[in-house]
Image (cartoon, rainbow, N blue to C red):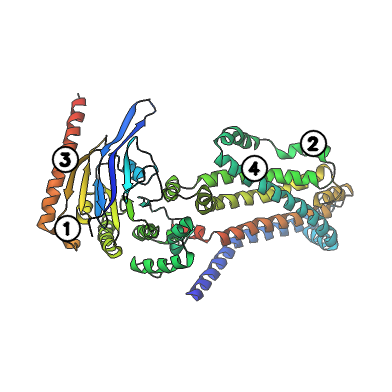
Amino acid sequence: MHEEILLKTENLTKEFVSKAGKTVTAIKNINIYVKRGEFVTLLGPSGCGKSTTFNIIAGLLTPTSGAVYINNLNVTGKTGYVGYMFQKDLLLPWRTVIGNLLLGADILDYDRKKAEQEAMEIIAKLGLAGREESYPAQLSGGMRQRVAFGRTLMFHKDLLLLDEPLGALDSQTREYMQEWLMQVWSEFNITILLVTHDLNEAILLSDRIYVLTKQPGEIKAEIKIDLPRPRSAATRRSPQFGEIHYQVNQLIREEETFEELDFAKEIP
Amino acid sequence: MKFYQDIHNLQKINQQFSKLLPSSILLFSLILVWEAVVRVFNIHPVILPAPTRILEATIRDWNLLINNMAFTMLEVMIGFAIGFATGMILAIMIVYSPTLERTVYPLVVASQTIPVFAIAPLLVIWFGFGIWPKVFIAALIVFFPICVNEVEGLRSAEPEMINLLKSLSASRLKIFRLVEFPASIPYLLAGCQMGITYAVIGAVIGEWVGSNRGIGNLMLQANAMNKTDRVFASILILSVVTMLLFVSVSVISKIALPWKDIQKTQS
């Protein structure tokens, strides 16, 4: 089931011209792939070009060079191939929970009746039964992210791009939502490419992790997470988890120490 | 569930009434003082009629007042419709055209400093004594808050939300219909609320400058005939109608934007 390659990027590079007229390379030679059904994470510090990479994959930005393939189709600079979920829940405050879930049907002209039925099923599966007619302002942060996730599911795209979807939540809700995300990923049989800077989150959820460097964003390492599935909250406390955490942390630290030394030099 | 909601609504209405209670008592006391002062000092009704006398005049002149008020309302409503439509259309054009935004929008904002009432006499010169100069003033007054608020409202949509729709290849029209326009409705209604009250004042001033009908015209005539009680009766009708307009826009807002109330109580 994990063999068909759903997403492949080929030497993605993006350069921006800054206001001062300098050329800034945001990302450089990003080569990644995601197989159907996989959970893959891009892990990196802020400013590593994660969002740039996502915007290119989503077709909102055109790369300076390189290409994006989804289902073996060259979709570079083309929108409409992924379900994109942002850090902000971006729920429409004037629509109820069910109304927000139907946004995709309204955008993509899906059959409204069918969509309504599906929305009710998804609401139940997301643990939001009884909140169909609530407005986003009446929901907690965790609930709002679940609605946003349900809405992304209802776009019916093969690949979901999740850009720090749990980034705005407090640490306790966040841990709980990580386990929840893991559960819905297997339940809905979907393919996820996640961006995060939270190492624990990346290890717990992913099949593979790409570690990105800071400016320009480059792939520094690809790590396969062999932790057995199904994983649970207990997985966080397993010795293997600790071992992987230590190894990846070493990798990230190399990057940070380098910067700190640089910074130290500037202090007289 | 529904029953609880009804009770909740009743409680809310009750709360709103109790909020109004102190100011109602004050208003009533002031009216009593007014009545007393007029009676005790025996003030001539041409200078200041007593509230009871104003009430009498209102009842006596009811048909006259209502007929003229209706004409003024006709001016206000036509003016409002024209101002609303042009304000909306221009706002949408400004938001979608960077050229118009740079050329027209600063002028629209700057033109708000021109006192529309000051150009009323010119309008009589251009359009005569009929209904149109008043309609024009009302339209002009409504146009500004609608246009400026709608521009701001259309821009209030989150850029990331628009990106989300773009990532799904949503058309420009869909982005407008599903995100930008709904986001602008609270701004638009706030503009309506501001616009409608000023539009009434605008129409009345237009009538003062030159007219043969309308509540403003009635006031002028009553003034000339020293019928001060009729002037006050006109003011009374005018205030009540303006207040009703204001309240009806609030009610429309509450019905159209149920989520706005929830947002307020939650934050």
For residue B264, say whether it is visible.
Answer: no
**Are there few (<14), some (14-19), or many (20+) residues within 10 Å of tag 2?**
few
Residue B32 position (above or below residue A84): below
SS class, disc 1: helix
Q: Residue beneath label 1, please?
A: A236
Density class for disc 3 (Cα within 10 Å; few <14, some 14-19, many ≥20) is: few
Foreground mark, 1 or 2?
1
Considering depth in this image, is A221 or B231 the residue closer to the camera?
A: A221
- Give the residue pinned by disc 3: A253
Separation of residues labelled 4 and 1 (CA atoms): 60 Å
Q: Which mark is residue B149?
A: none
- Residue beneath disc 2: B122
Amino acid marked by disc 2 = Leu
Say which element carries label 2. helix
- Amino acid at dot 1: Arg
Q: Spatial distance from mark 3 to mark 4, Cα to Cα?
A: 58 Å
On the rendered structure, is B172 left or right of A228? right
Q: Are marks 3 and 4 on the same chain?
A: no
Label annotation for residue B144: 4
| Residue for point 54% across, 69% down | B9
Q: Which residue type carries mark 3? A: Arg
Image label count? 4
Q: Is label 3 in a helix, a strand or a loop?
A: helix
Q: Nearer the viewer, residue A115 or A242?
A: A115
Which quarter of the image is occupied by the C terminus of chain A? top left
Among numbered discs 2 and 4, the one appearing first in the sequence = 2
Q: CA distance from mark 2 to mark 4?
A: 19 Å
Q: Secondary structure at mark 4?
A: helix
